[in-house]
Amino acid sequence: MICYRLEDPEGRRRWEALQAARTSPFAHPEVLLGLARLFGRRVEIVEVDARGGPAAIALLVRRMGPWRWASHPPLLPESPLVVPDASVPALPERLLEALSRRYARVDLHLPPGWTDVRPALWRGWRAHPLYTYEIDLEQTSPAHWSENPRRLFRKAAASYRLIEDARLAPVVARLVAAGYRRHRRPPPASAERLAALLEALARAGPVRIFGVQHASGETEAAVALMVAPPRAWYWLAGSMPGPAMTVLLGYLWSRLREEGFHWFDFVGANTPSIAEFKRRFNPTLRLYFRLTCDRSPLQTLLRHMPGLR
């Protein structure tokens, strides 16, 4: 096992070389470093030799006294992973072992489709099921939706126009914060800091920002997409009450399809009211897992006291 920090130039070069072939936007160094700054953590990468080549994961780490806590990067749907063979959707046992030895607590999210969690369970990890919705962009149009969004789109679409502009980052951040407040949850960060992150990631490349502008001139819905063709992720989004988000999605899916995208991930279907909104567009439900491992605090303390090992 080797461990290195993404903040170090050599660590960044090593991580970029490892994840280049996978081209996941969640593994992009600027995404990880931006989230680390936003939440006051550092990015650690644990790498092991697995069957067929290196396996690695990037996690946000903080210290709690003598213990290291490693967590899935907040706001991302899946943990940034590199495995030797992407056709085998499972965490190598050597990586599981390395994580449980290094950290007192580990919390990570597997990508959708990685449903064989038995190696983790056999090692004492816990698995919690989560869900997301996926849209096949070749098979979606208002005719495929349920009656309510289909009626809203046809009635309101002519009053809006779709725009793509990185300068909409503050609008996304403001609408996201308002959505959290409507659900009586604290926003993940201030609107100003979230907007700064989105602006930086739009410049770096893994994020595209879209909105729908009403005929009155106001942008009533906006979304920051994570993109890695042929897939796009509904990463951060918000809207004013009304038809704006339905119209945005209808226009956006048509635009992405024209650009050659095939799949759209709704990034979560775990909050009842939000999941119900997404369900009306006739998506496919997909399962993924959160894995957690907690070791005894006493065992962790002993490992950090050489005379008592």
Image (tube, helix red, strand yellow):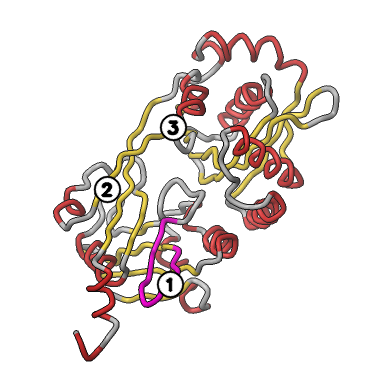
SS at circle 3 = loop
Q: Amino acid at mark 3?
A: Ala
Reading the chain from its start, which is encountered first: label 2 or label 3? 2
Reading the chain from its start, which is encountered first: label 3 or label 1? 1
Give the residues drawn in magenta, as a range: 60-72
Q: Amino acid at mark 2?
A: Pro
* For residue 168, side relative to residue 237 (left or right): right
Membership of 70 in magenta stretch: yes
Label 3 Cα neighbours within 10 Å, binned few <14 / some 14-19 / many ≥20: many
Vertical arrangement, residue 306 with respect to residue 140, above or below: below
In the rendered image, the quadrant that contains the N terminus is: bottom left
Residue designated by label 2 = 89
SS at circle 1 = strand
* For residue 291, side relative to residue 279 (left or right): left
Q: In the image, residue 298 lies at what x, y percent?
A: 24, 73
- Residue 179, disc: none
Label 1 Cα neighbours within 10 Å, binned few <14 / some 14-19 / many ≥20: few
Residue designated by label 1 = 63
- Residue 269, disc: 3
| Mark 3 and mark 1: Cα distance apart in space | 31 Å
In the rendered image, the quadrant that contains the C terminus is: bottom left
